[in-house]
Image: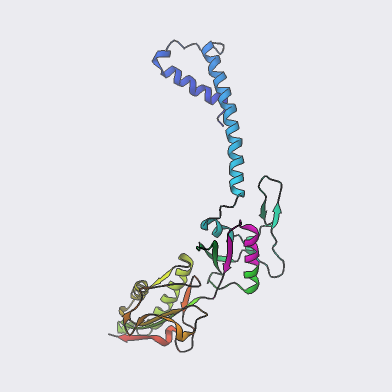
Amino acid sequence: ARKTEQIQQQIIDSVQADSTLSGATSPSRRAHWRLWTNEVATASNNLEQVWDEKKIELETAAAQTPAATPPWIQARMFEFQYDSNTPQVLQLYTNTTKPYYYYPTVDVTKRIITQCVAYSSFNNVMYVKVAKGDTPTALSAGELSAAQDYVDSLFPAPIFYIVQSSPADKLYLNADIYYKGQYSAVIATNVISALNAYLLLLAKTDFNGKLSLTDLEIEIKKVEGVTDVVLKNVGARADGTAFGSKTMLVSNSTENFRDWQTKAGYIVQETTSGNTFADTLNFIAE
């Protein structure tokens, strides 16, 4: 709220700037026109104090009332705490018109979730997909169970919330990579490192996003010494899908699909023996 003196001075400045009120020039505080400016200023100050109190009340209620939007859910999941030795139990705060759950002790070192996306289905279910770590990995069974309990306590009914966390999808990449011969000693290492770095960046910046064939080509061509790339066979799969049942985005240099919608929310190079990047990338000196 503005101070009474500040409001009164603004009124006086307006009066003196108005040519029709030029007669109101007395500097005396007892002048009638100055008395009513003080009365109006006092009333305005009282009203603004009431507004301030109401604003605090509304903002507090809004902060305590679950919005249940995907960004709100994501923010709450990043606050989830887990300790394998000391259970992190939410407490219910009831000394308010809108009770809410909170951690009695906030410990940011116990916040394990680093990636999260929430999305709804058509059957009144909200899926909350998460991963942990600087290099994203799936939550353990205990962590996932605790996260689901956290969600069930914190998020509002009647929507059902399902927390999901799975090992990374796998990318099979068979390609001919053409390069300048002078880079022969480092080209394989540099290309594979660039691909792994790109997949990690994708997990961190576009969790649950799509992997694009075009972006793969671009990342390979960015590597110093690479002159061209031909994608011959490209496949992707969820971790639980057998290698032989992967979805082929490119087959025998023919594109079937432009991109892959990640299932776990993130993807890494194929781990099946004999099918890693080191096994399937063919480097050709020009």
State whether residue 128 is above or below residue 92: below
Visible residue check, residue 51: yes
- Give the residues in magenta: 146-167
In terms of depth relative to the viewer, which is nearer, 3 or 250? 250
Residue 6: x, y in percent? 53, 26
Instruction: Name the image quarter holding the C terminus.
Output: bottom left
Visible residue check, residue 104: no
State whether residue 214 is above or below residue 178: above
State whether residue 149 is above or below residue 63: below
The extreme bottom residue here reads 274
Residue 134: x, y in percent? 54, 69
Identify the residue at horizontal 60%, vertical 31% (top origin). 49
State whether residue 56 is above or below residue 70: above
Quadrant in which residue 41 is drawn:
top right
Instruction: Name the image quarter holding the N terminus.
Output: top right
Identify the residue at horizontal 45%, vertical 89% (top origin). 274
Q: Is 126 part of what is drawn in magenta?
A: no
In terms of depth relative to the viewer, which is nearer, 52 or 26? 52
Residue 204: x, y in percent? 48, 67
Residue 113: x, y in percent? 58, 65
The extreme left residue here reads 286
Q: Is 155 part of what is drawn in magenta?
A: yes
